[in-house]
Image (cartoon, grey):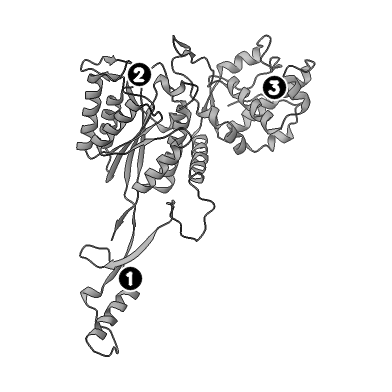
Amino acid sequence: MRFTRYTKYKGGWIDALNLEGLMDQLSDFLLNGGFAGGPHYHPYWGWSGVEDTNSVDALKRQLLQALIESGELTPEMIEELRGEGQGDEAVQQEIAEMLDRLIERLVDEGFITLENGQPQFPGQMQDVTGEGNIDEAKEAAQTVQFNLSQKGMDFLGYRALKGLLGGLGKSAAGSHDTPHLDTGIEAEAASKPYEFGDTMNLDIPATLKNAIERANADGREVEGPLDLDYSDLMVHQSEHRSSCATVLMLDVSHSMILYGEDRFTPAKRVALALSHLIRTQYPGDSIHVLTFGDRAEQIPLSQLSKAQVGPFHTNTAEGFELARRILSAQKQDMRQIVMITDGKPSAVTLPNGQVYTNSGGLDAHILRRTFKEAAACRKAGIPINTFMLARDPYLVQFVRKVSEIARGKAYFTSTVTLGQYIMMDFMKRKRRRVG
């Protein structure tokens, strides 16, 4: 990737700027994939998909906002951006070069990649305030797209995981026992009598104690070597962490960004955090992500940040069917479906491949197909844990029915508590008592 180098602009503070802190500030923007299909008008909900979230020009606007909020810009720059300045071309040029340098650093450090062109162009960027004519540099920046790199995805996943676990009430690691679950720390339990098939992880003090007590009970003085009996043997217990295959189902129907609340970006943030946790702490596990709107589709984790909602209905039945097929190919001893949704099932795929939709109420045919697929998951030994972001009475009834059929759990939560609920549920399922 070639960059245009400016000789006049020094920008020492830009080179010293903490990029990780900047990425943290940009996390909402970077995980907001926008609205699929471009501008879309709904008679009740108005326009959607008019925001530009993938171009370098959009990234520059977010960088400016982050720099303003962090107090990094000079008063002259802020006045120019607010349209209160004198139209100083030198200041505008400095802002343009500063933004180019920041994007260059993000690319050099491996947080983002660029496609369809170069991020920098010679000439002045006259329209830093968003008013007036769009010059050649701005128009070109709108055609250059950026993508999060694997490093960028890992960073956002780590920060999201750190924030979620911190929200569970734990501070820095120490040596004190707590009732909380944690990652990477083995929990010890009381020892138990040895049974055939147990791992021979002997609790030597407890075993010797049993042998001495048995000898004393026989009235013999304990001298010399102890005779161990089968009943004396005691073995340590530990927390067994079984391997688990997880399919995360993300609702991409229109309602996930409506009603004055973006519910989809928090869902993607949780998916990134969960994938980071699994990859770093549970290497035997696997996680797969699928989206379900009018149709269900598996997406690679590398493309999660670009996932979009759209003018879609909610084909929950096809989501269950696809998730079950994915999990049937996994070799882990535990399998589960985690579904994040905010609406009722309103679509189903017919045998001829067409999609039948009905947004008005709970359609009996759609419900039957959805419950049928939930029963198929139960037969395959796959529980469905549903995280519902709405609390309408009929939705509560639907979610509870799905959980009952598939022997899963139902959580009625919000975008604020969604991540904590999912993390707590996942880590609790990772532990069961064994000998």
> How far is the residue under mark 2 from the one under mark 3?
42 Å
CA distance separating discs 2 and 1: 58 Å
Residue 218, by quadrant, is bottom left
Label 1 sits on residue: 203
Residue type of the residue flagged with mark 2: His
Q: Residues within 10 Å of mark 3 (few under 14, many from 20)?
A: many
Q: Residue at x 73, y 16 (%)?
A: 83
Of labels 2 and 1, the one closer to you: 2
Residue 162 place in picture, x, y as percent: 51, 44
Q: Tag 1 or tag 2, which sits nearer the N-term?
A: 1
Q: Return the mark for residue 81.
A: none
Task: Quadrant for residue 399, please give it.
Answer: top left
Q: Under tag 3, what secondary structure?
A: helix
Determine whether the residue tagged by mark 1 lies in a helix, strand or loop.
loop
In the picture, the disc for residue 96 is 3
Tag 1: amino acid:
Asp
Q: Position of residue 175 (x, y in %)?
A: 50, 61
Which label's residue is closer to the chain start, 3 or 1? Answer: 3
User: Between residues 299 and 431, which one lies in front from this camera angle?
Assistant: 431
Q: Are marks 2 and 1 in contact (CB under 8 Å)?
A: no
> In front of the other: label 2 or label 3?
2
Disc sitting over residue 313 in the figure: 2
Q: Is residue 293 left or right of residue 153?
A: left
Earlier in the chain: of badge 2 and badge 3, it is 3
Question: Residue at coordinates 33% horizontally, 70% vertically from top-left?
Answer: 203
Q: Residues within 10 Å of mark 2 (few under 14, many from 20)?
A: many
Residue lying farthest to the front in this orientation: 393
Circle 3: residue type? Ala
